[in-house]
Image: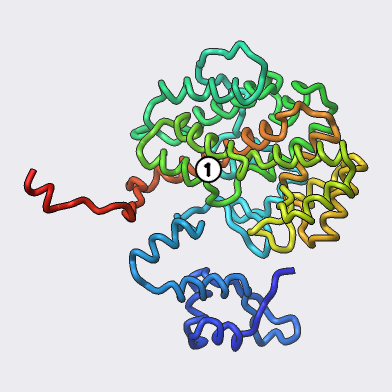
Amino acid sequence: MASWISMDEACRLLGVRPQTVYAYVSRSKLEVMPDPADTRRSLYRAEDVAGLARRKQAGRKHETLAANTLFGSEPSIPTALCAFFRGRPYYRGQDAVSLARSATVEEVAQLLWAAEQTVDFSCAAPSAPAHAGQPGRVAAFTALASLAATGHSTRGRLTRVLHSEGQGLVGQLANAFGAQRGGQPLHLRFAQGWGQTPQVAELLRCAMVLLVDHELTSSAFVARIAASTGASLPACLLAGLSTLSGPLHGDASGRVQALFSEVERLGEDQVVAHYLSTGLPLAGFGHHIYPDGDPRAAALLALFEPPEVIARFIQKVTALTGLQPNIDVALAALVAHHRLPADAAFALFATARSVGLLAHSLEQLGVAQVIRPRGRYVGQMPDMAQASRA
C-alpha cells in the first residue's frame, strides 16, 4: 500500500505551515485521504510530499527549474486524458483496470478522443503502399512512414475529420502487424490473424485496453511536440511510435522475452542467482510509478497461468527482491503461454498505444503554441575577440 503521513509530518518535511499544505491540496499537487483512525483528521500521500520537497529544495531559479523539469522526467503539460490516483491509471476519470474487464479498444478510443460517433478501426484506411514482407514492425513502420511523408497538416481541419483519419491509421497499423482484416473489434481481428481462439482474444482485449495510454510518457511527449508544429496525424503517430520502439519504453517486453528464454534454457534458480550475484537489473520487475506493484500486470496475470517455469521465476524474483512484475512481464508471459508471434507483445503495445498517442496529438491541437524547450549551452565558448577581428 502507498504510505500516508500526518499534517504535522507533511509540514515538517516541507518546511511550511498547514495553510500551505491546504493550498497544495487545492491545486491537486498533494493527494489527501481521511485518517481511518480519526475521520476528523487527514493523511497526505508521502510520495507527493517528497516530490514537493525535492522541487522546493531545488530553488526557484528559472534555469534550475527548466533543467529539473525536463531531465527530472516531470515535464508538465495540462491533459485530461490519463492520470494516476492511489496507484492506478485512470482514463478521463475512469479506472483503466476496471475498463479492461469488459471494454473494447474501440470503446476506450471513443472515450479518450471524446468522439461523438462510435469508433470503428475496420473503416477504410488511408492509402499506403503495401509492404511485400511478413506482417510485423517493418511493415507497420514502412506503411506509417509513407503516410507521414504525404499526410496533410492537422491545422484548419475539423475534429471529426481527424477522428476519421485516426481510425484509419490505427486500423492500418493493426493490419500491418498481422490482424485479420474485417469489421470485427481489434482484439478479435488479432486473434484470428494469429490463429487463436475467442478465449485468447479476450486476453488480447484486456491487454490492449490496459496499454492504451499512460499519462505523459516519452512517446506521448514526442507526439505532442509533433502535433504542436501542425504535423500530419501519421507524422505525429510515427514520431510517437518511433520513441515507443525503444527497449526502455514500449519494447521492454522484448528484454523480458530474452530473460524468459534464459529461464527456459537454464532454469529459474541459475538465472536468478546470476542476476542477483552480479547486480544486473531484472527486466520487467518494479515500476517507478507503482511502488506497490503494477496493477495492469496484476489484472492481466490473474486471467491466465504462465508456463510453469516462468511462473516459478516470477515468484522467486518477487520473493528475493520484493519487486513486483510490471506490464512487460505480463505481456511476455502471455506471448509465451499462447505461443503468439515473436513480436506480438510489441504489436499489441504499439497498436493499443497508437490510440493514446493520437489522443495526445488531438488534445495538443487545442494549444496554439509550439513546444520548444531551450538548450542550456555547456560547451566551449567562442573567442569573441577573434570573431570581431575576422
| Residue lying at the far left of the rendered structure | 389
Residue type at tag 1: Ser
- Mark 1 secondary-structure assignment: helix
Considering depth in this image, is 178 or 389 the residue closer to the camera?
389
Q: Residue at x 53, y 51 (%)?
A: 216
Q: Position of residue 257 (x, y in %)?
A: 76, 38
Q: Residue at x 54, y 70 (%)?
A: 51
Q: Seen in the image, is 334 located left or right of residue 20?
A: right
- Which residue appears farthest toward the right when viewing the image? 308
Image spot of residue 66 (x, y percent): 38, 61
Which of the pair 7/241 is nearer the observer?
241
Q: Is residue 305 visible?
A: no
Name the residue that disc number 1 marks: 219
Residue at (52% x, 81% y) in the render:
14
Q: Coloring scheme of the render? A: rainbow
Where the N terminus falls, by quadrant? bottom right
Up-down relation of residue 69 to residue 341 (above or below) = below
**Which quadrant of the rendered structure holds the C terminus?**
top left
